[in-house]
Image (spheres, rainbow, N blue to C red):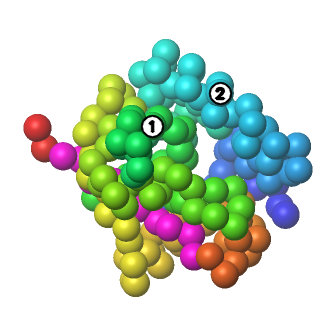
Amino acid sequence: MALRRESPVRGRRLRLYEALIERFMMTPIGYQFLLHLAPRIDKVVIPLTRGRLSSAGFDKVGLVTTTGAKSGQPRTQPLALLEDSNGLLAIGSNYGRPNHPAWSANLLAHPECTVEFMGPPRQYRAELLTGAARAAAWAAAADFYAGYERYRASCAPREIRVFRLTPIAG
């Protein structure tokens, strides 16, 4: 894998620190960091920085609070979020594991959620993408983080859920 690569989503080449972070996250040690340490760090750092800084850098990860599908209780999960023309994209890769992440089931059952990302918390409504909309969102996600393609291959035949989070006016 090349250290630097073009990024049509960003409209530029990756900066050195972005390429290094991505490369590290795709290593076995980086994978363990993402699974075990990053969520704990992000639950502390993101609120302190009003959604700007996370373990993955600036403007990469937000806190998404869903309503539990079974429990009805609030559940907060750090998620990589991509800006989209209609809101944000959330990718249910679950790090390439065979099952869908719990937060994605929560959004299917209760589409309203709160997102703290690049500013104070805001209300959003989630939509599971299918067809051409999902394909376009997936292409953007795979460009945003090359590891998503590895996750897709490792969790097959499960299709990774892709959600568009649209701000609720109010």
- Looking at the image, which residue is at 65% across and 27% down? 40
| In the image, residue 164 lies in the stretch drawn in magenta | yes
Find residue 75 and name its label: 1
> Residue 64 versus residue 12: which sits nearer the camera?
64
Type of residue at label 1?
Arg
* Res 77 visible: yes
- Residue bearing mark 2: 40
Image location of residue 62, percent across then percent down: 48, 37
Q: Position of residue 59 (x, y in %)?
A: 50, 37
Disc number placed over residue 11 in the picture, else none:
none
- Residue 44 occupies quadrant: top right
Looking at the image, tell me whether mark 1 or mark 2 is earlier in sequence order: 2
Q: Nearer the viewer, residue 168 or 21?
A: 168
Against 164, is 64 above or below?
above
- Residue at 28 percent across and 35 percent down: it is 122
Q: Quadrant of the C terminus?
A: top left
Q: Tag 1's secondary structure?
A: strand
User: What's the amino acid at mark 2?
Assistant: Arg
Give the residue drawn at x 71%, y 62%. 97
| Image point (48%, 50%), residue name | 103
Q: Which residues are magenta?
A: 159-168
